Amino acid sequence: MNNKEKPEFKNNKSLTQIARVLRKNMTKEEKHLWYDFLSKYPIRIYRQRTIGKYIADFYCAKAKLVIELDGSQHGKAEIEMKDIERTNYLSNFGLTVVRIPNYAINNHFNEVCRYIDSLIVANLKK
């Protein structure tokens, strides 16, 4: 895939509707990250954004960054395989995918925010 090709954001109307529902029903950790950091970030970040056949928890188009928050179920082998498939799919669009466990949001919030900021800054320099 060349750099000029972009993910299809609006073609799957069923996912667009699901994304709207997910935005209205964010997890506690998603709300914390969104309202206490990402919504105020100086570069636009989207919540529950449709990218191809997936919905990303958070997406920064300018930095080509997808941020996925993972609950405890992501430690199971079956879910981990799906996460790998999802990450590979999104990476094929030239996106950086970062997975952050809910535990980190709840216990190391400031460090998570600094980490996300450093990823955005680094990706903008690419």
Image (cartoon, grey):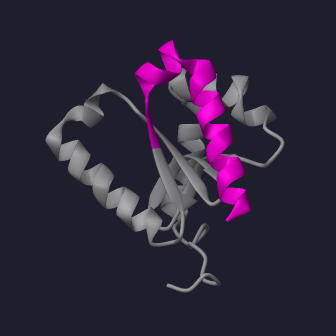
Pick the quarter of the image with the C terminus: bottom right
The answer to whether residue 82 is left or right of residue 61 is left
Residue 67 shows up from this direction: yes
Q: Residue at x 30, y 26 (%)?
A: 72
- The total number of labels drawn is 0
Classify 120 as above or below 90: above
Residue 31 shows up from this direction: no
Q: Residue at x 30, y 55 (%)?
A: 84
Classify 66 as above or below 32: below
Q: Residue furthest top?
A: 107
The answer to whether residue 125 is left or right of residue 85 is right
Q: Residue furthest right?
A: 42
Kindly indicate the quadrant of the structure image that contains residue 115: top right
Residue 30 x %, y %: 56, 29
Q: Residue furthest left?
A: 77
Classify 25 as above or below 1: above
Would you say residue 117 sits in the magenta stretch? yes
Residue 28 x %, y %: 53, 20
Range of magenta residues: 99-126
The answer to whether residue 43 is left or right of residue 111 is right
Q: Residue at x 57, y 73 (%)?
A: 8
Residue 62 x %, y %: 73, 60
Would you say residue 88 sits in the magenta stretch? no
Kindly indicate the quadrant of the structure image that contains residue 78: top left
Q: Residue at x 24, y 33 (%)?
A: 75
Residue 42 x %, y %: 84, 42
- Out of 102 and 118, give the one closest to the viewer: 118
Q: What is the chief secondary structure element of the magenta stretch?
A: helix
